[in-house]
Amino acid sequence: MSSCNSSNDSINPATQLQAEVAAIDKYLDENNITAIEDITGIRMEIIQLGTGFPAHSVSSVNVDYEGRLFTTGALFDNGTVEGRLDTYIRGWQRALTTLPSGSQARIYIPSFYGYGPNGQGTIPGNATLLFTVKFNKVLTTTQEVQKLTADTVAIDTYLADENIDAVKDSTGLRYVVTQSGVGPTPSWYQKVKFKSSYKLLTDDTNVVFQIDTEPNENTDNRVIDQIADGIKLGLLKLPVGSKATLYIPSKLAFGTQGATSGSSQVIPANANIIVDIELTEIVSP
């Protein structure tokens, strides 16, 4: 399942991608299959939705899989893999960063996100791929577990010192609902509009970044697409119209890379953060 680079100047990649996505969508429609439509053209038929977080691009994952050619159904590979997600084909990278761990799904991957016009091994060029996957888990190191534990302790100490009564989630997220909305609560793949402002736990009077988030022509802005896992989880807990303050350990925030705005680093690496969030609308059904 390792990725490869291939090129063929005689083929227009955009035209090929469009044709393959149309074929996938036609198949799904004719067979009454409901699938998640990703902005890339990848489609995911959810068999069982997991309850964990999706992977990040640099995560290591454990996945059981079966790979077939979409057009013929021919099996070309199957087994279990465990490794860094960024070493696999781009279709897997996109799917497993938008699929909660613990999920089982069928993933329809256009060749542009697979092995391209040259193919690989028994996979011909411009082959649309169909993978049935069981996304067992995102692997975490001992150091990551220890860091999450330490960050959670730091947040709980802050909350105790400030006499803040927060809901304590088993993931390490802590939150206080400051205004209860009366609208529906979003799910993983729904598009949402929300407002958010960010502070560091170590400097809770200074807003370092704020943004109004909504879908546009370049992004879905689904709950699943948010960068920070703590934001994803927070949105899943809030009915529309709600406001809340989220206390997010660094592993569920921006991790070892931190976050930038333009050319400025606004959230340093390994920073616990406080996010004030308001969910204003669910855009998609």
Image (spheres, helix red, strand yellow):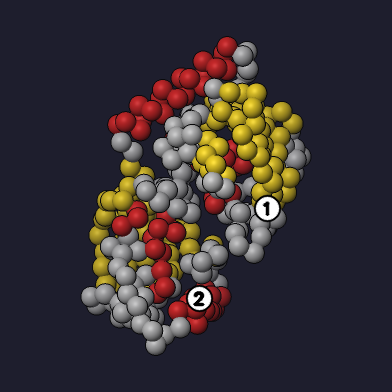
In the rendered image, residue 74, in percent from the top left (x then y), is placed at 30, 77
Q: Earlier in the sequence, mark 1 or mark 2?
A: 2
Q: Please tell me whether residue 181 is drawn above or below residue 127 in the rendered image.
A: above
In the image, taking residue 3 as reference, residue 188 lies left or right, namely right
Q: Please tell me whether residue 90 is drawn above or below residue 182 in the rendered image.
A: below
Res. 279 image quadrant: top right
Q: Please tell me whether residue 123 is drawn above or below residue 88 in the rendered image.
A: below
Tell me the kind of residue under disc 1.
Glu
Q: Residue at x 40, y 25 (%)?
A: 149
Depth order, front residue of 42/257: 257
The label on residue 21 is: 2
Q: Residue at x 61, y 23 (%)?
A: 204
In the image, taking residue 121 as reference, residue 68 lies left or right, namely right
How far apart are the alpha carbons under marks 1 and 2? 25 Å
Q: Which residue is labeled 1 in the image?
A: 214
Q: Residue at x 32, y 70 (%)?
A: 5
Q: Secondary structure at mark 2?
A: helix
